[in-house]
Amino acid sequence: MANILDYLSWRGDVSFSYAKFNEVDNLILSRLSYLPFEDFIGDTECMTIQEAYWQFAKIPKPSVLQKEDLDLFPALAKSERFSHLMISDFVNHVSVEAEKQFSAIVIHLPQNLYVAFRGTDDTIIGWKEDFNMCFLDNVPSQVDSLTYLEKIAKKYPEQKLIVGGHSKGGNLAVYSSAFCNNDTRNKIIQVYNNDGPGFSEKIIQTSEYQSVLDKLICFVPQSSVIGRLLNHKGKSIIVKSSQSGILQHDLFTWQVYGTKFEKLDALTVKSLFIDKTIRQWLEKVSPEEREKFIDIIFQILSDTKVTSIEGLSKNWFYHASVILKSYTNIDRESKDIVFHTLYSLFSLASSNFLNSPNKSKILGHD
């Protein structure tokens, strides 16, 4: 089985002059946006990927979201295909008050620009913003992505744009491409959504969203969960993953064959089961109820005083006791909201499971 790291070993010495940009390159540049550029690049700096890696290598204990990034970055820096590509216009805005986590970077391809939006990072507030998509038509990072894309289009007037991202980054790529001004939209030649969540029905029905569908390519793994959330239009291309369930969201598990992904014809029964259950839950629980539920859950998490998922997991037993105590101390109304919201979800899941002719496939491995 081969992934993007294997692709770099095999294809890294082939420049874009000899082989055009492809879907696997898109995934690699989407992942590039997750690298911790905030530790060594300013928002006005421009440098090659190789030069950025040299800066990164000076950091005694660099922080990355996944250990595979420690293999990806040097492989990119050593490759003929990627090492001399310029990167610029890096931004990273995290605000607890605004409940926002937004980051983006521009990669200068020989013919075009790839605008890469980062997905959810390790911050609790980043995850809070993701959950807010369950009841808001627009979240702050979507608004920022629109402003950012228009700024890039204006700054580089001669360049065409490829816009992409993974997870929330894929959602931002679609949103910004759909709602940007006409001048910017006319510069866009392709939009890549790599297992990113969808949108509210209100957004889906807009003419702006419909206008970008002919440029949109959506990739999802065969047991996609994140990429099936909320509403989508257009066809998704199903990619084979070496993992199962929610772990398939990890793009390092996506299987590559040559310059393309390994494709499958259909999603798994488990993915369809989860998608059906969540859609029913969203129909049953009002946006107002979802908002209250999510606010309560994250208020309880905030009592732990940690700001990242890693921090939460480092001393889990202690933090679990804080969470339990916080839940015990909330008022009766809040407890009822948590109970009834979770009850609705689990009862729908139970009903769908009992009525499914494919119980073994839902319970089994993908």
Image (cartoon, rainbow, N blue to C red):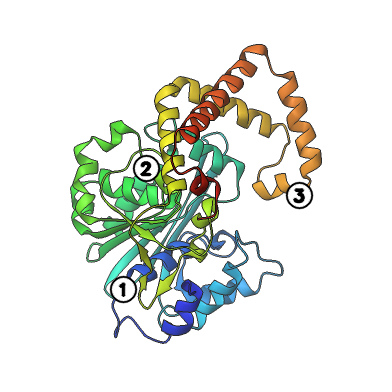
Judging by the rendered image, the residue that carries numbered circle 3 is: 314
Q: Which numbered dot is residue 198?
A: 2
What distance separates the C-alpha of mark 3 from that of mark 1? 40 Å
What number is the disc on residue 194? none
Q: Position of residue 57 (x, y in %)?
A: 63, 74
Dot 2: few (<14), some (14–19), or many (≥20) neighbours within 10 Å? many
Q: What element carries label 3?
A: helix
For this view, does 181 lie left or right of residue 135? left
Residue 193 lies, with reference to residue 179, above or below; the image says below
Return the residue found at the far top.
332
Query: Would you name the residue on which mark 1 appears?
Result: 21
**The one of 258 and 209 positioned closer to us in this rendering:** 258
User: What residue is drawn where x is 56% and y is 19%?
Assistant: 340
Which residue occupies 43% across, 22% down? 284
**Which is more toward the observer, 134 or 260?**
260
The crowding category of the residue bearing disc 1, from other C-alpha atoms within 10 Å (few below 14, some 14 to 19, many at least 20), is some
Mark 2 and mark 1: Cα distance apart in space: 26 Å
Image side of residue 309 versus residue 202, left or right: right
The amino acid at mark 2 is: Gly
Q: Earlier in the sequence, mark 2 or mark 1?
A: 1
Lower sequence index among marks 3 and 1:
1
> Based on the displayed image, in which of its 4 quarters is residue 60 positioned?
bottom right
Q: Where is residue 66 in the image (x, y as percent from the top left)?
A: 60, 62
For the residues bearing labels 2 and 3, Cβ distance under 8 angstroms: no
The local crowd at label 3, few if under 14, some if 14 to 19, many if 20 or more residues have their Cα within 10 Å, is few
Q: What residue type is labelled 1?
A: Phe
Does dot 2 land on a helix, a strand or a loop?
loop
Is residue 129 rendered to the left or right of residue 272? right
